[in-house]
Image: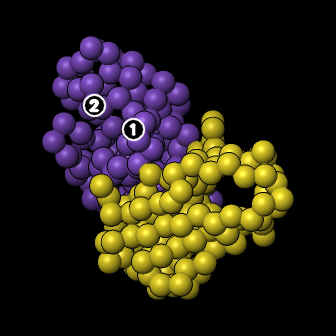
Chain colours: A purple, B yellow
């Protein structure tokens, strides 16, 4: 079974600062996917960024980038130039590769990120 | 708008009631999922349907009964629930044979069992 650990229950930074959210995971799989999801007060889970484990290059999406360390099983999210709208719960998630339709996600407990004006 | 709609948004029910949660997706996806989000706990996968066939039941109690009449609709039928079943229930969808395809999530149904 896979586990995903987010060790920071809550973080707070000033607007325009850079913030890094940590995530570690445990798996015996070699091929898998990692995700960061954002859940604002509207409750809708929004995909922030996705990483394929077989790719060494770190994924980036505008102000969002990851530091994927496969050997260390670490997958941190960096948010640059943080904005008030980034305030939300952030969840790290894991999915095994090649399970056909049964590709459910395993989530961490989440980090509540607060961007202060 | 992610293309996944859940109703109702809020639901309060007694332990002897029977109710159903509904999820509808307009993304042309073939896989649909139910997740449970409880306070202080990670989201838990409950059920997976792929091409209307249930492919995973993650040890969910029988008082939760899913139904997937077609690839666009997913229901979660509830009966004789317990107070600890109070949670946010999220529906998601994705392309079949995932291969890491991203999922669209609904806004959830906030369920309170009294």
**Which part of the image, by quadrant, shows the N terminus of chain B?**
bottom left
Instruction: Count how many numbered circles sit on residues in the image.
Output: 2
Where residue B72 appears, as percent x and y from the top left, is 42, 77
Could you say which disc has been placed on residue A40 in the image?
Answer: 1
Asked if the residues shown at circle 2 and circle 1 are in contact, with their CB atoms under 8 angstroms apart, the answer is: no
Provide the chain ID for the residue under circle 2. Answer: A
Kindly indicate the quadrant of the structure image that contains residue A18. top left
Could you say which disc has been placed on residue B87 in the image?
Answer: none
Where residue B6 appears, as percent x and y from the top left, is 47, 60
- What residue is shown at x 53% (from left), y 84% (from top)? B69
Residue ranking furthest to the left: A62
Q: Is residue A82 left or right of residue A99?
A: left
**Which part of the image, by quadrant, shows the C terminus of chain B?**
top right
Q: Is residue B88 left or right of residue A99?
A: right
> Could one spot residue B21 in this view of the protein?
yes
Q: Which residue is mark 2?
A: A85
Question: How busy is the neighbourhood of tag 1: few (under 14 within 10 Å), some, or many (20 plus)?
Answer: some
Q: Is residue A115 above or below residue B106?
A: above
Kindly indicate the quadrant of the structure image that contains residue B56. bottom right
- Mark 2 to mark 1 CA distance (whole Å): 9 Å
- What residue is shown at x 32% (from left), y 21% (from top)? A115
Q: Is residue A10 above or below residue B60?
A: above
Q: Earlier in the sequence, mark 2 or mark 1?
A: 1
Question: How busy is the neighbourhood of tag 2: few (under 14 within 10 Å), some, or many (20 plus)?
Answer: few
Provide the chain ID for the residue under circle 1. Answer: A
- What residue is shown at x 78% (from left), y 70% (from top)? B62
> Do the dots labelled 2 and 1 sit on one chain?
yes
- What residue is shown at x 53% (from left), y 67% (from top)? B22
């Amino acid at each position: 079974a896979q586990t995903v650990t987010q060790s920071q229950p809550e973080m707070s930074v000033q607007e325009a600062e850079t913030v890094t959210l940590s995530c570690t995971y445990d798996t015996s799989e070699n091929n898998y996917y990692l995700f960061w999801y954002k859940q604002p007060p509207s409750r809708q889970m929004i995909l922030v960024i996705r990483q394929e484990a077989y790719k060494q290059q770190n994924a980036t999406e505008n102000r969002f980038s990851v530091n994927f360390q496969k050997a260390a099983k670490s997958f941190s999210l960096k948010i640059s130039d943080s904005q008030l709208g980034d305030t939300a719960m952030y969840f790290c998630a894991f999915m095994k590769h090649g399970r056909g339709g049964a590709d459910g996600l395993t989530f961490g407990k989440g980090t509540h990120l607060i961007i202060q004006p | 708008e992610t293309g996944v709609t859940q109703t109702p948004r809020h639901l309060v029910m007694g332990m002897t009631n029977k109710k159903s949660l509904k999820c509808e997706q307009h993304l042309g996806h073939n896989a649909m999922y139910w997740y449970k989000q409880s306070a202080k706990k990670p989201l838990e996968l409950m059920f997976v349907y792929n091409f209307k066939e249930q492919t995973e039941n993650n040890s969910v109690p029988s008082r939760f009964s899913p139904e997937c009449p077609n690839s666009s609709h997913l229901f979660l039928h509830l009966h004789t629930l317990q107070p600890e079943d109070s949670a946010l229930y999220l529906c998601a969808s994705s392309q079949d044979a995932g291969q890491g395809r991203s999922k669209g999530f609904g806004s959830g149904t906030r369920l309170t069992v009294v």
